[in-house]
Image: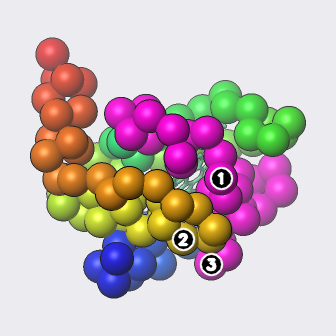
Amino acid sequence: MERGKKLYQSECLACHQADGKGVSRLAPTLVKTPWVLGDKKVLIDIVLNGVSGLEVEGEYFYNPMPDHSRLTDKEIADVLTFVRNSFGNKASVVSAEEVKQRRLAKKK
Ligand code: HEC
């Protein structure tokens, strides 16, 4: 969690903000959204590949989210574990192994 928090501060905070609530029209909230709390595969893919065109709580965003594939499996696992257990969220941890599987799936 501590490592995840530091990574969040360096990699995600600029857009999603310290409280995880995002900025209207620029970046969506990470508080209890179906992507954060739902299928880990989908969540891992968002961070690995970036994402665009989502409707989050009735809002669309002008800019896409960039990919974060330069982070290691462990770093992505740590930051997602942090996000899934912060800002009022409560969900299972993400392991480096799960991130590795998604990276491999993407290469195929
Ligand atoms: C440059 C700004 C930026 C950065 C940095 C960024 N995001 Fe995003 N993120 C966005 C935008 C914009 C969207 C919505 C894109 C769309 O669908 O149009 C988004 C969407 C998401 C979503 C899916 C929608 C939701 O709210 O549940 C998740 C989850 C997410 N980001 C997590 C992260 C995590 C974790 C990090 C750090 C590793 C991160 N983001 C870094 C801008 C950013």
Instruction: Using the image, determine if residue 38 lies above or below residue 17.
Output: above
Instruction: Using the image, determine if residue 32 lies above or below residue 60.
Output: below
Res 20 visible: yes
Dominant SS of magenta comes to loop
Which residue position holds label 3?
Answer: 18
| Alpha carbon distance from label 3 to label 2 | 10 Å
Q: State the residue at coordinates (83%, 56%).
A: 24
- Which of the 4 image quadrants contains residue 77? bottom left
Toward the viewer: 12 or 87? 87
Callout 1: CB less than 8 Å from ligand 1: no
Instruction: Using the image, determine if residue 104 lies above or below residue 59.
Output: above
Residue kind at label 3, given as amino acid type? Ala
Res 86 label: 2
Dot placed on the residue nearer the N-terminal end, 3 or 2: 3
Left or right of 10? Residue 59 is: right
Res 32 label: 1
- Which x, y percent locates residue 23? 77, 62
